[in-house]
Amino acid sequence: MNEKVMRNQRKWQTIILAAIIIVLTYLSSDITNFNIIHGIATLPNAVTWIVSNLFITQETLERLPKILEKLAETILMSIAATTTATVFSLFLGLMGSKTTGTNNVLGAFARFIASVARNIPVVAWALILLLSFGQNSVTGYLALFVGSLGFLTRAFIESIDEASQSAVEALRATGATYFQIVYKAVIPQCLPQMISWILFMIETNIRSATLVGILTGTGIGYSFDLYYKTLNYHAVALVTLSIVISVIVIELVSNHIRKVIL
Amino acid sequence: MPLLKVGKLGKSYNGDTKVLSDVSFEVEAGEFISIIGPSGAGKSTLLRCMNRMVEIDEGKVIFDGNDVGSLSKKELRKMRTNIGMIFQHYNLVPRLSVIENVLHGRFGYKTTVQGILGRFTEDEKEQAFYLLKKLGIEEHAYKRCDQLSGGQQQRVGIARALIQEPKILLCDEPIASLDPNASKVIMDYLKSITMELNITCIVNLHQVEIARSYSDRIIGLSKGGVVFDGPSFRLSTDSTDLIYGTKTVEKRQLVTV
C-alpha cells in the first residue's frame, strides 16, 4: 500500500516536471519570437552550405605553415597562462583550504579572488582587458591567466581539503612546522590531482584561446577571423581542422600522463 | 610529581553542547592507561586536549611541568615533540614510502628548511630502520604506504610516533579499524614497547575486554565526565554498566576507588 502511494507520487512528480519544462520552452520561444520548427527546417540548408564551402583545397594548403605558426603561438600562450596561474593558485589554494588555511581573512580573500575570476567568463575578461591593454597577445594571455587562476584555485582548494586532512593532523601532532606539513604531507598527497587539473586547464585554455584570439587579434583565433571575414572559407576549414586535431592530440597526451601518475 | 595532570577540564564545541565537563585525573610516568566509554563520550576530545590539537576551554592540562593551554606556538611545537600520537585511520601520507613516513616524526626537532629538504642525519635513519625492524615491517621500508595492510600501516604509525622519542603516547582508537588478529598484534607491540622504553601510554578503546587485559588502569568516560577511575581489576560489571549506561540510569554516581 505504502509502496503504491510512493510510486504514484513519483509518477505525478515526473508528469508535473515534464509539463513545466514544456511550458517553459514554449513561453521562452514565444517571447523571443524563435520558431523551433523554422530552425529545424533550415538545418538541411546549413549542412549543405558547410559541405559545399568548408573543405580544404590544394591552394589553401599553401597557407598551412603560416597557420601552424599561429597555432603553435596559441598553444604556447595557453601553456604559459596555465603554468603561471598554477603558481599563484597554489598559494591561494593553500590559503583557502580549511585544512591548511592559517587565517580566516586570507581564506576568504582567496575564495573571493577565485570566485570573481571564475564567475566572469574568459570572453568577458578578454573584452574588459582589451580596453586597458589594447589588441595584443598580452591581453589574450591575461584573459586566460585570470580564468585559469579562478578555476585552479577552486580545484586546488577541493583537492587539498579532500586528500590530506588526516596526514596534516598527524604531522601537526609531531610538532612539525606549517611549511614542513605543506611540503611533506599536503603536496605529495595532492600532486596527482593537481597535475590532472593543470592538464585539464591547458586543454580548456587551448580551446578558449581560439575565441579569445578572435577578440584580441592574436594567435590562431586571429587567422580564423581574418579568413572568415575575407570569405576564404577553405582556409577557415583548414584552421578549424588544425585546432580540432591539436586539441585531440593534447587530450590524448594528457590522458596518458594522467594514467601514468595516478 | 605526575607526568600529566588534567584538572577540571571542560570543552564545548558549539558553545552549548558540552563534550567534556570537570574531568580531572593524574598520570604517573610509565603507566599504561585505557580510556573507555561509548561513542560520543568525549574520548577523542579528551586525548586531543592533552596535546592541544583542540583548544582547551576550561580547566588545565599540565604536561611535564608545562601548562599546555598557555603555551606559545613555538613552545607548543616543542612540547608536541615529546608526545607521540597514534590514530584510528593511521593518518599516514599514503603516496609516500614507509621510511619517509617514519622520518616525518622527526620534523619537530628540525628547522623548516631542514624538514622541507628532507635532511635527516644518519643516526635518525638508523633509528628509523631499527624501529621498523622492531615492529617487524623492515622489509616494507621502501614500499608505498598504501600498499600495506591496515595492521602494517598502524605499525608505521607507531614507528613514526616512537621516533619522536616521546615521553607519552596518545593512541586514539588504534585498533578500531583492524581485525582481531591485527588488533592483538598492535596491542602487544604497544604494550611491550612502552614497557621496554618506559613510555607512558594512554589508549582510547571501545573494547572493555582488551582494556582490562592490557592496561594497568582504566578511566571510564560517559557523557563527558569521568565515571570510573581505577586499576583494571577493579572494573566490575556494575562499573561498565555505569560507563555504557546499559542498566538503570538512576544509579549513576561517581565510583571512587
Image (tube, coloured by chain):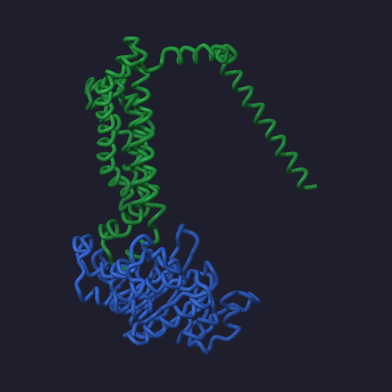
Q: Residue furthest front?
A: A58
The residue under the point 51% across, 76% down is: B36
Q: Nearer the viewer, residue A40 or B190?
A: A40
The location of residue B22, given as percent across then percent down, is: 45, 73
Q: Is residue B181 left or right of residue A130?
A: right
Q: Is residue A116 visible?
A: no
The location of residue A252, given as percent across then percent down, is: 38, 39
Q: Nearer the viewer, residue A115 or B143?
A: B143
Q: Nearer the viewer, residue B130 or A113?
A: B130
Q: Is residue A190 visible?
A: yes
The location of residue B101, given as percent across then percent down, is: 32, 67
The residue under the point 45% across, 60% down is: B13
How many marks the image carries: the answer is 0
- Relative to A230, residue B175 above or below: below
Q: Is residue A86 left or right of residue B204?
A: left
Q: Is residue B114 left or right of residue A258?
A: left
The residue under the point 47% across, 68% down is: B20
The tint chain B carries is blue
- Relative to A250, residue A231 above or below: above
Q: Residue furthest right?
A: A1
- Please state, as top left, top right, bottom left or bottom right, where the N terminus of chain B lies in the image: bottom left
Q: Nearer the viewer, residue B8 or A22?
A: A22
The location of residue B88, given as percent across then percent down, is: 45, 68
Q: Is residue B200 left or right of residue B174?
A: left
- Relative to A220, residue B124 above or below: below
The tint chain A carries is green
Q: Residue furthest bottom?
A: B233
* Quadrant housing residue B84: bottom left
* Quadrant housing residue B91: bottom left
